[in-house]
Image (cartoon, rainbow, N blue to C red):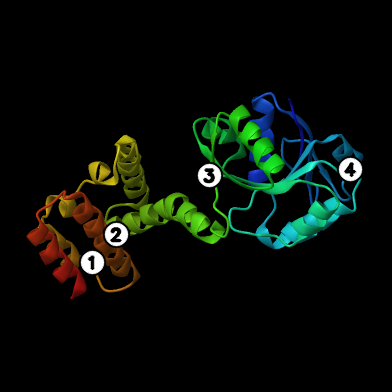
């Protein structure tokens, strides 16, 4: 079965999904936003267009705060009463789904575990990626088929666990960028120009991400903590001035000690010493 998809939401996520679906041969019958956009994609704006009636699947890719309004729009539109409604939020449990279900719409979640900063790269990013799904069985079945068309696999989100699920996604997708910015800031404090520091840190992080192909976190972890190098950690702590950046270093170093200890990857007494240093 080949679904016809209507994408509601023309931000980066919506446009990325639109382009990825089209590149994968999915019949996308519309891309709709709140206002006209100066983008290369064919975005409609204003009231929902008649083309929504052609869709078997309506995928809502708007901000969480706009979800219930968007779902209400679908409820008063010309959408087919049996069309599956999926939303792309990884954390929200929108109240508006209940009204759509009462009208006969199977509903659920289609949350790409894909960092869509550039819609033009979305099709490539989806290949081999994962999509979080939940909801009514028909909605989950449709979401699974759509993910497969994109070359992605699905992760079933357990009931009542969306906030924890989404927090994990944020840790993995948002915070590496924050860490790169903080590392660049630390280098800048030594006098290294920001442009050179940013380029060097990006290269280093690309290598660190490549290490994630290992079969366990401890095998991917490198550096002084997994080696049990107490002296180096002491020098780091002496070099980083008190403040937010030092707090981040200490929090992550403590977490790294836990990873190394659980895997038996370093001498236990050395890890004890590192924990004592971090607690001072």
C-alpha span from label 2 to label 3? 30 Å
Tell me if 109 is positioned left or right of 49 in this view.
left
| Neighbourhood count class around disc 4 (C-alpha, 10 Å): few under 14, some 14–19, many 20 upward | some
Task: Answer whether labels 3 and 1 touch (C-beta < 8 Å).
Answer: no
Q: In which quarter of the image is the N terminus?
A: top right
Residue indicated by mark 2: 186
C-alpha span from label 3 to label 1? 34 Å
C-alpha span from label 4 to label 3? 29 Å
C-alpha span from label 1 to label 2? 8 Å
Question: Residue 264: where, in percent of width, then height?
Answer: 16, 50
Task: Answer whether labels 1 and 4 touch (C-beta < 8 Å).
Answer: no
Does label 2 or label 3 sit earlier along the sequence? 3
C-alpha span from label 1 to label 4? 56 Å
Residue indicated by mark 1: 240
Does label 4 or label 2 sit earlier along the sequence? 4
Residue 77, label in figure: none
Label 3, secondary structure: give it: loop
Task: Answer whether labels 4 and 2 touch (C-beta < 8 Å).
Answer: no
Q: Relative to residue 254, is residue 76 depicted above or below?
A: above
Question: Residue 27: where, in percent of width, then height?
Answer: 75, 28
Q: Which of the two marks, 1 or 4, is nearer to us in this view?
A: 4
Q: Quadrant of residue 80?
A: top right
Label 1, secondary structure: give it: loop
Question: Residue 172: where, in percent of width, then height?
Answer: 43, 50
Residue 49, label in figure: 4
Q: Relative to residue 194, is residue 5 depicted above or below?
A: above
Does label 3 or label 1 sit earlier along the sequence? 3
Task: Answer whether labels 1 and 2 touch (C-beta < 8 Å).
Answer: yes
Residue 113, label in figure: 3
Residue, x 85% and y 54% (percent of image)? 73
Decide which of 242, 126 is in the foreground and name it: 126
Task: Answer whether labels 2 and 3 touch (C-beta < 8 Å).
Answer: no
């Amino acid at each position: 079965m080949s679904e016809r998809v209507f994408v509601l939401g023309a931000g980066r996520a919506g446009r990325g999904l639109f382009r990825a679906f089209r590149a994968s041969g999915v019949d996308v019958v519309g891309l709709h936003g709140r206002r006209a956009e100066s983008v290369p994609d064919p975005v409609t704006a204003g009231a929902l267009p008649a083309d929504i009636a052609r869709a078997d699947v309506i995928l809502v890719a708007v901000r969480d705060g706009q979800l219930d309004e968007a779902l209400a729009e679908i409820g008063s539109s010309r959408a087919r009463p049996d069309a599956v409604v999926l939303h792309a939020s990884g954390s929200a449990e929108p109240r508006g789904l209940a009204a759509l279900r009462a009208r006969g719409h199977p509903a659920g979640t289609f949350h790409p575990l894909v960092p869509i900063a550039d819609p033009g790269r979305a099709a490539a990013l989806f290949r081999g990626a994962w999509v979080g799904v939940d909801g009514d069985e028909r909605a989950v079945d449709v979401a699974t088929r759509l993910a497969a068309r994109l070359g992605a696999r699905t992760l079933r989100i357990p009931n009542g666990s969306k906030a924890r699920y989404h927090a994990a996604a944020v840790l993995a997708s948002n915070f590496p960028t924050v860490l790169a910015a903080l590392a660049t800031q630390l280098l800048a404090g030594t006098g290294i120009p920001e442009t050179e520091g940013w380029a060097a840190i990006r290269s280093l992080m690309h290598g660190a991400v490549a290490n994630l192909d290992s079969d366990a976190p401890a095998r991917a972890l490198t550096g002084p903590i997994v080696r049990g190098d107490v002296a180096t950690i002491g020098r780091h702590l002496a070099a980083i001035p008190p403040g937010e950046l030092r707090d981040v270093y200490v929090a992550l170093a403590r977490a790294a000690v836990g990873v190394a200890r659980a895997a038996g990857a370093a001498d236990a007494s050395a890890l004890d010493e590192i924990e004592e240093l971090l607690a001072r």
